[in-house]
Image: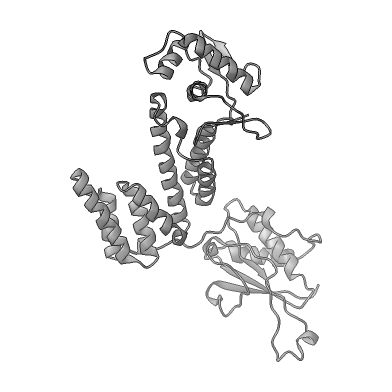
């Protein structure tokens, strides 16, 4: 069963069918119990919350009727239990959308701490995807819901800011500008959103618009609160004015390679111990090469050796991931009649740390001569 408060109150059964929850007072009882899930709530407290201190004489009997009907609507014995002199709604882990949202946000924070912005972005998007509208929107004027509505609303915008931060760290500012402009209009006093908009605009080559966003916020703060922007935002303005290089977008990040990401060889690796040792020494030694090119006639084993070198690199405990590329050279008969040009294609690639932000394709010794090495293979 799934309970939802990140939007209008909603309950769905195991098949996803939404359940009828009755009239407003009955739905209010369920909402109060959900806000205190797995805790007993005294009938006196429920009566106070439901009627705001103006309970009729029949309030207790009405409450009992609401609880009875809710038990039937939920259709599970023991879901609303009588415990410690009160009513307790028992909710299992993962059944309440609020709990799932907060868990995903926490997991995203752990990903940020470890520097995995891609995973953090995915977690935050998943968390925000649980929202169906303003929290407890059908109880926005009920006193019992006010504190939780305010808390969840603030938490949601904080998660939005965190997700935008992750996208900026991944260099995806172009697609954020329109969204950020809307968020700034909706939340004109939030300096973090303004700073994110300024940075996205600056990276898009719109320095004047970035500075205009700062002036807009500065004016609102001065007129409404008699304040000036905090130091981090003022520092960002100065950095934009001076074209500080630290504001540049980071290069697109590629995931760290692992042996499991490489193609599965069709044949076992036999021999070539000397060549493998030579490649390993070139890649891992002092001033290790960025690129080792394997050349040789067709069928000499370049692809298989490149895969083996990449596998060895991916298993290295120091995380030294090599850019090992096998370069297919056609034999002399195939090259004849093609204007002396040979067809070349990469056979296996695993990124080196110093190449982590570069897509390796069709390498040549001319383009990578500064940090490259050549290993020539003879026909076995």
Q: What is the x, y in percent for residue 345?
A: 69, 74
Along the viewing direction, whichever of 107 and 325 lies nearer the viewer:
107
Along the viewing direction, whichever of 333 and 136 lies nearer the viewer:
136
Q: In this figure, what is the number of numbered marks?
A: 0
The colour scheme is one colour
Along the viewing direction, whichever of 55 and 76 lies nearer the viewer:
55
Q: Residue furthest left?
A: 226
Quarter in which the N terminus is drawn: top right
Residue 264 relative to residue 93: left or right: right
Residue 336 vs 54, above or below: the answer is below
Residue 25 relative to residue 204: left or right: right
Q: Which residue is drawn at the image coordinates 60% and 25% (left, top)?
A: 92
Q: Which residue is drawn at the image coordinates 62% and 53% (left, top)?
A: 316
Along the viewing direction, whichever of 370 and 360 lies nearer the viewer:
360
| Residue 136 in sight from this viewpoint | no
Quarter in which the C terminus is drawn: bottom right
Q: Which residue is drawn at the image coordinates 52% and 21% (left, top)?
A: 26
Q: What is the x, y in percent for residue 379?
A: 79, 75
Residue 137 vs 63, above or below: the answer is below
Residue 234 relative to residue 358: left or right: left
Q: What is the x, y in percent for residue 288?
A: 55, 65
| Residue 271 in sight from this viewpoint | yes
Q: Which residue is drawn at the image coordinates 50% and 34% (left, top)?
A: 8
Residue 245 vs 180, above or below: the answer is below
Residue 356 vs 182, above or below: the answer is below
**Picture quadrant where residue 333 is located:** bottom right
């Amino acid at each position: 069963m799934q309970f939802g408060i990140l939007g209008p109150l909603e309950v769905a059964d195991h098949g996803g069918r939404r359940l009828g929850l009755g009239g407003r007072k009955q739905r209010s009882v369920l909402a109060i119990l959900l806000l205190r899930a797995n805790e007993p709530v005294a009938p006196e407290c429920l009566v106070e919350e439901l009627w705001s201190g103006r309970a009729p004489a029949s309030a207790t009997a009405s409450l009992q009727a609401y609880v009875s009907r809710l038990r039937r609507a939920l259709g599970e014995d023991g879901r609303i239990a009588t415990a410690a002199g009160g009513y307790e709604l028992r909710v299992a882990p993962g059944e309440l959308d609020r709990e799932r949202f907060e868990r995903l946000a926490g997991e995203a924070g752990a990903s940020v701490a470890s520097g995995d912005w891609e995973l953090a972005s995915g977690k935050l998007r998943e968390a925000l995807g649980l929202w169906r509208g303003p929290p407890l929107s059908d109880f926005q004027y009920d006193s019992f819901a006010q504190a939780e509505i305010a808390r969840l609303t603030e938490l949601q915008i904080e998660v939005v800011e965190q997700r935008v931060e992750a996208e900026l760290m991944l260099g995806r500012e172009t697609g954020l500008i329109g969204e950020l402009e809307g968020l700034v209009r909706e939340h004109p006093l939030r300096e973090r959103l303004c700073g994110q908009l300024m940075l996205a605009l600056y990276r898009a080559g719109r320095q004047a618009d970035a500075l205009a966003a700062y002036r807009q916020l500065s004016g609102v703060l001065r007129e409404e609160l008699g304040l000036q922007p905090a130091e981090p935002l003022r520092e960002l303005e100065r950095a934009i004015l001076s074209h500080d290089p630290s504001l540049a977008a980071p290069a697109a990040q590629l995931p760290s390679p692992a042996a499991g990401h490489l193609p599965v060889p069709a044949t076992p690796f036999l021999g070539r111990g000397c060549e493998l040792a030579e490649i390993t020494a070139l890649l891992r030694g002092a001033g290790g090469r960025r690129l080792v090119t394997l050349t040789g006639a067709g069928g000499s084993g370049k692809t298989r050796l490149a895969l083996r070198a990449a596998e060895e690199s991916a298993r290295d405990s120091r995380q030294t991931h090599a850019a090992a590329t096998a370069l297919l050279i056609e034999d002399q008969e195939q090259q004849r009649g093609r204007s002396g040009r040979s067809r070349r294609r990469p056979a296996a690639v695993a990124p080196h740390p110093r190449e982590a932000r570069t897509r390796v394709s069709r390498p040549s010794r001319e383009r990578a001569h500064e940090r490259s090495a050549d290993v020539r293979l003879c026909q076995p």
